[in-house]
Amino acid sequence: MIEVEGLSKSFKVIKRDAGVGAALKSLFKPKYFTVQALKDVSFKIDEGEIVGYIGPNGAGKSTTIKIISGILVPDSGKCNILGYTPWKDRVNHVKNIGVVFGQRSQLWWDVPVIDSYNLLKDIYQVPDREFKDNLELLTSTLDLSSLLSTPVRQLSLGQRMRCEIGASLLHSPKILFLDEPTIGLDAVSKMAVRNFVKTINKEKKVTVILTTHDMNDIEALAERIILIGKGKLLQDGTLTELKNKFVTHKTLTVDFTENNEDIQHIEGTTLLSKSNERISLSVNLEKIKVSEVIGTLSNKLDIIDVSVESRPIDEIIVDLYKEYEI
């Protein structure tokens, strides 16, 4: 569905020192240096996938999205999306995609949301029946009914982002590019966006490429992770593979009926805390399974409750960045 091969993109940036004199000098004799945003990036994405495209600031994520959405032209490389080259066949290409930039808006600031939607309907030449059906679906799933008659400038950030996502899907795109869609949103708005993305992916088979610094978004939505750093593609695999690589320990906490007996050490575990009614252990997954530890404890204790905690996804991603020195 999406085939990217050898994409490269560089930008010329003016370099100048501080001060008025340096500013005047750079005005007449500017000095430039080249920033290599992308270096030979290649990947393939199949229909119905949700892919987390991650990396630190300046890694090249937004540049990639802008190229494959047809906004930028690469210096070199190929891109085939549903049979079209984005920067060459823009009119036909944009009919198949929806794009949401968390820090940019496609809604008109001073008019009600529904007016922007009607204008987008005309721009994309959406048939009346299809527009009505899509608007009903988006209104119900994103809870937009009370927002459609409100000018965009009067919406909160969370409300505006829900409307932005709705706007990007009015023309029934097959691919959705989400660039920082939950930036600055509260917990309720984030949950609404995540649930909606899951719904359209499952029900309409919309392919989603998600770039974000919120790793909870990645954990909640993405099945596959593509890591980019310093313009280069560094890793491409599933989230499960990533966790298996970096999660070597889990924390096991067991609540049980009061018991004063001494619990012998279990090989492969480290005691974190213990009382007459609770015990917490760090379990080394390379030496023993969590289920085996629970089984051993159940033979000695009358267990009431069990909880297993893994390392937060943020810490795993930090380790991944450190491994690639980005």
Image: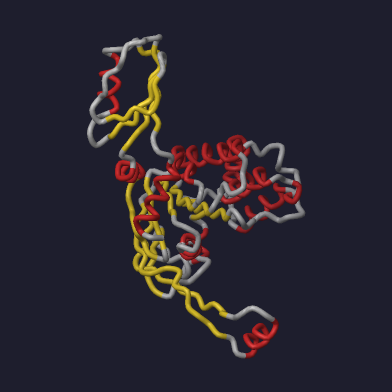
Q: Please tell me which residue is depicted at 60% across the width and 46% down the height of the picture.
A: 166
- Tell me if residue 25 comes above or below residue 69 in the rendering: below
- Tell me if residue 179 comes above or below residue 12 in the rendering: above
Q: Please tell me which residue is depicted at 62% across the width and 85% down the height of the picture.
A: 26
- Tell me if residue 38 comes above or below residue 180 in the rendering: below
Quadrant in which the N terminus is drawn: bottom left
Q: Is residue 205 visible?
A: no
Q: Please tell me which residue is depicted at 52% across the width and 57% down the height of the picture.
A: 95
Quadrant in which the C terminus is drawn: bottom left
Between 16 and 215, the one nearer to me in the picture: 16
Between 174 and 274, the one nearer to me in the picture: 274
Image coordinates for residue 181, horizontal then vertical, percent: 56, 49
* Residue that lies at the very extreme toward the bottom in this rendered image: 28
Image coordinates for residue 6, horizontal then vertical, percent: 35, 68
Residue 41 lies left or right of residue 16; in this view the side is left
Residue 188 lies left or right of residue 221; in this view the side is right
Total numbered labels: 0
Between 47 and 184, the one nearer to me in the picture: 184
Image coordinates for residue 322, horizontal then vertical, percent: 38, 55
Q: Is residue 58 visible?
A: yes
Residue 74 lies left or right of residue 13; in this view the side is left
Residue 276, by quadrant, is top left
Image coordinates for residue 123, horizontal then vertical, percent: 62, 58
Q: Please tell me which residue is depicted at 67% across the width and 43% down the height of the picture.
A: 159
Residue 185, by quadrant, is top right
